[in-house]
Image: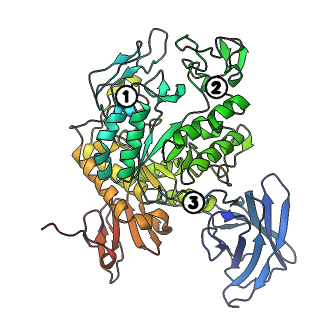
């Protein structure tokens, strides 16, 4: 049998509905033969994760007898979970398997199974984040709003805003992370107007709860705002004033571990409490796992200052997720959502309960999980996760897009980027896609400018500490390519504070420098403000507009986003020559400049265009 077979899971011509499937929703699959064919039997072979294969006979559909033969099947799936499928074709003398290629198209006799995510819509999909812009802030490094309390006797309080963060190990061989530059909640309040100018609709704060370090991932007390950042009243004021400007506040929930210097563990006796380290009779003792009490205990990634919690221990689960727990306490204060740190290290039962409590307070509260891989089929600790099947995470951090956007910008591999986008759109429910946290860098990664720019010799930590890119003009072209895709692909862009000002930096803590107020790189700032304005102007399209690929060859990645509110076209040219877009007889406008688009996209440039007849131009000032 030499006939070629056609199937593409991201086309409703072959699979309807597109993407993940809601429980009980009919699934229609169409398999096409490109030349006349008369197999004796055609089957869909569907397998629920961990269960046995089920064969569904496909029905012959009469089409053009001289060109195409089509078989179809409709399946009703009533149980949520992860499913996989392929096709079997029987002829009089042979059997053929039709599998999935890396680009989701059919392969005859080879390929893996297509994935089908079947989910239950337990909670209403959050609305406020769709089409917006997120902005990530490490409070200590953003802006000093004054009234520094300097309450930590061990801390190094810096007066050199913008200085190089301490990175050398101390006398004990540890990097203390106890130098504080003075950024705080009042500083964020004072800069809300600035953030509004960037198009920001959601401010994601790295941890703000009381903790020993400057980064606060070593929680000391979940019920207190760290005194170096301000007070609960300051947070209330930030929430209220941000809300008036159309912005929500998202908090970072770090529940897989606490700090050893905490009210719960109290290793150093700095708290007026009986911590788990102090006594086996401590109310917090069962929160942790000791192998040799008290000095040998399970810790996060074997970092002993971060004792690991037992999230399913009833008293801990109740403390975080109970009626009077931490999730409800801060959600009731008016925050718009939670970003759950290392979600793959939180048990499903804990995640279920955490999300339930947040939604019980505010149905539109968004709960995002930090997941670095494809969250629809993630396996952690030898267990398949069910983040997106319903009743759990609203969405996740979108590292798959990040990696292949950067790969495209580095080497022009548009086809690989398209395949990654298609896989995520195939695997994730629509509401998850619309709320994806699209990032290019974070506090955990090198900054985008340092990643894409040439910083010379970075072979040692001391050299990386002071590294600077050598060709700023080329770097901003590369960053523009990446940022344009970040701001226009399905999901929500998350801008890491300072990227818009030209901040550079490799690994922690070099990627956590202070925002360079009054010393911003104006070119970057202008670029990101334009992207924010475009996204704000076309929010109705970017909120849930369908992704339609247009070009993915010769270093050019082009696509449309469209829905009932219109269409926007994005063209990123990483090729070595100009790309000519066929405008036909249609006039287009460059949305960044609001000038006519002549059809040409220069090498190393990107544009966002729209039919001129559909553009709403701002009124000219009189």
Q: Which quadrant holds the C terminus?
A: bottom left
Placement of 312 over or under 45, stated as above or below: above
Does label 1 or label 2 sit earlier along the sequence? Answer: 2
Q: Quadrant of residue 379?
A: top right
Q: Position of residue 189 (x, y in %)?
A: 33, 40
Which comes before the other along the chain, label 1 or label 3? 3
Q: Return the disc, 2 or 3, that comes first in the chain's sequence.
A: 2
Q: Residues within 10 Å of mark 1 (few under 14, many from 20)?
A: some
- Residue at (65%, 74%) from the top-left corner? 14
SS for dot 3: helix
Q: Is residue 11 above or below residue 238?
A: below
Is label 1 or label 2 in front?
A: 2
Q: In the rendered view, would you say 572 is above or below 156?
A: below
In this view of the protein, which residue sits in the foreground, 396 or 189? 189
**Residue at the far right in the pictured view:** 92
Picture coordinates of residue 395, whole percent (x, y) = 57, 51
Q: Residue furthest left?
A: 622
Q: For the residues marked 1 and 2, what is the alpha-carbon distance in whole angstroms?
A: 31 Å
Where does label 1 land, which residue?
Answer: 464
Residue 75 in which image quadrant: bottom right
Q: CA distance from mark 2 to mark 3?
A: 32 Å
Disc number lying in front (1 or 3):
3
Residue occupying image coordinates x 31% and y 59%: 533
Q: Which mark is residue 431?
A: 3
């Amino acid at each position: 049998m030499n006939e070629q077979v056609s199937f593409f899971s991201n086309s409703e011509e072959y699979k309807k509905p597109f993407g993940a499937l809601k429980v009980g929703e009919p699934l229609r699959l169409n398999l096409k033969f490109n030349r006349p064919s008369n197999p004796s039997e055609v089957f869909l072979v569907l397998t629920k994760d961990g269960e046995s294969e089920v064969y569904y006979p496909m029905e012959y559909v009469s089409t053009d007898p001289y060109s195409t033969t089509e078989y179809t099947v409709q399946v009703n799936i009533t149980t949520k979970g992860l499913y996989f499928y392929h096709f079997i074709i029987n002829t009089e003398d042979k059997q053929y398997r039709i599998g999935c290629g890396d680009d989701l198209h059919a392969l005859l006799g080879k390929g893996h199974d297509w994935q089908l995510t079947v989910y239950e819509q337990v909670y209403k999909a959050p609305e406020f984040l769709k089409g917006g812009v997120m902005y990530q802030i490490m409070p200590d490094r953003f802006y000093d709003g004054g009234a520094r309390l300097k309450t930590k006797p061990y801390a190094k309080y810096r007066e050199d805003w913008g200085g190089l963060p301490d990175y050398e190990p101390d006398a004990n061989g540890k990097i203390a992370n106890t130098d504080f530059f003075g950024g705080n909640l009042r500083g964020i309040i004072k800069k809300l107007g600035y953030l509004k100018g960037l198009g920001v609709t959601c401010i994601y704060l790295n941890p703000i709860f009381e903790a020993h370090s400057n980064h606060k991932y070593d929680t000391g007390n979940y019920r207190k705002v760290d005194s170096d950042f301000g007070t609960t009243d300051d947070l209330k004021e930030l929430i209220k004033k941000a809300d008036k400007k159309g912005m929500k506040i998202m908090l970072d929930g770090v529940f897989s571990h606490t700090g050893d210097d905490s009210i719960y563990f109290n290793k150093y006796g700095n708290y007026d409490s009986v911590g788990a380290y102090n006594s086996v009779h401590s109310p917090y003792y069962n929160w942790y796992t000791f192998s040799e009490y008290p000095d040998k205990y399970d810790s996060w990634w074997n970092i002993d200052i971060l004792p690991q919690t037992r999230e399913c221990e009833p008293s801990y689960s109740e403390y975080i997720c109970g009626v009077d727990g931490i999730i409800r306490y801060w959600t009731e204060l008016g925050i718009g959502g939670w970003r759950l740190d290392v979600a793959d290290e939180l048990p499903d039962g804990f995640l279920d309960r955490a999300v339930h409590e947040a939604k019980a307070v505010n149905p539109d509260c968004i709960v995002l999980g930090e997941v670095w891989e494809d969250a629809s089929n993630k396996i952690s600790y030898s267990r398949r996760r069910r983040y997106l099947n319903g009743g759990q995470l609203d969405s996740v951090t979108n590292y798959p897009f990040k990696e292949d956007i950067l790969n495209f910008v580095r080497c022009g591999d548009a086809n690989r980027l398209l395949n990654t986008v298609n896989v995520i759109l195939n695997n994730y429910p629509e509401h998850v896609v619309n709320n994806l946290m699209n990032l290019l860098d974070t506090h955990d990664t090198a900054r985008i400018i340092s990643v894409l720019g040439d910083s010379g010799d970075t072979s040692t930590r001391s050299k990386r500490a002071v590294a600077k890119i050598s060709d700023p003009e080329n770097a901003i072209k590369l960053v523009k390519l990446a940022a344009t895709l970040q701001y226009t692909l399905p999901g929500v862009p998350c801008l890491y504070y300072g990227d818009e000002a030209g901040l550079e930096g490799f690994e922690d803590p070099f990627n956590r420098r202070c925002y360079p107020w009054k010393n911003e790189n104006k070119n970057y700032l202008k670029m990101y403000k334009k992207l924010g304005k475009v996204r704000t102007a076309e929010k109705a399209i970017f909120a849930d507009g369908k992704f339609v690929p247009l070009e993915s060859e010769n270093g050019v990645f082009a696509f449309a986003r469209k829905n009932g509110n219109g269409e926007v076209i994005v063209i990123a040219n990483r090729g070595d020559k100009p790309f000519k877009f066929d405008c036909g007889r249609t006039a287009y406008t460059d949305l960044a400049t609001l000038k006519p688009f002549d059809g040409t996209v220069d090498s190393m440039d990107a544009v966002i265009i729209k039919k001129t007849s559909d553009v709403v131009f701002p009124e000219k000032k009189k």
